Amino acid sequence: MGALSACSSSGQQDPLLEEAATYHRQATDIQAVLEPKIDQIDSLKAVYTAQKKPAAVVVSLDSLKKAFEDWEANLVEVPGMPHTHTHEHGHHSHQHADATLADLPAEQMRDLQRATLTSIKQIQVRLNELTPAPNP
């Protein structure tokens, strides 16, 4: 774990921003896991409809997909932190809204990233409840 401090050329990083970056990394790790499942929602809805699953389940899948897309649209990078995640998802274009929020005080940035992580975890829980586990 010592490699993290070795490449900090600007001296000491703000610990609040370090914490914010940790939340951001955790959130984008979950995002990477959820994205393929979100991409399958349309085909899953067709299966559920064919299986005569309750309409509420299909509606829930729709709202979950929308929640995920809104979450991605509002994802904010932590200023000054290296961008370690890459997005290569074909039709997904990831625009991070960092320009407008880069001036946030470190404490607010940390709180924002914590809230972002909480939101994606809630989406993950709901998605796991609504989608079947993959067959081994």
Image (cartoon, helix red, strand yellow):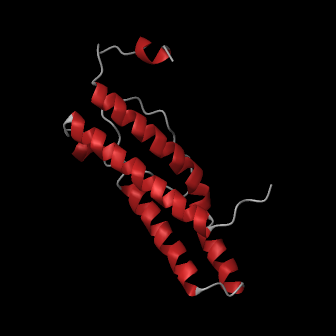
Q: Position of residue 11 (x, y in %)?
A: 29, 13
Q: Quick one: quadrant of the C terminus?
A: bottom right
Q: Position of residue 15 (x, y in %)?
A: 30, 25
Q: Nearer the viewer, residue 119 or 78?
A: 119
Q: Is residue 4 left or right of residue 58?
A: left
Position of residue 14 relative to residue 7, above or below, is below
Residue 13 position by quadrant = top left
- Residue drawn at x 47%, y 40% as measured from the top left: 26
Q: Nearer the viewer, residue 113 or 84?
A: 113
- Residue drawn at x 41%, y 15% as measured from the top left: 5
- Residue drawn at x 51%, y 50% as measured from the top left: 31
Q: Position of residue 122 (x, y in %)?
A: 46, 58
Q: Is residue 61 left or right of residue 95?
A: right
Total tally of numbered discs in the picture: 0
Residue found at the very far right of the displayed protein = 136
Residue 51 position by quadrant = bottom right
Q: Position of residue 92 (x, y in %)?
A: 51, 56
Q: Is residue 78 left or right of residue 4?
A: left
Position of residue 62 relative to residue 73, above or below, is below
Residue 106 visible here: yes
Residue 95 visible here: no
Position of residue 58 relative to residue 85, above or below, is below
Q: Is residue 112 left or right of residue 43?
A: left
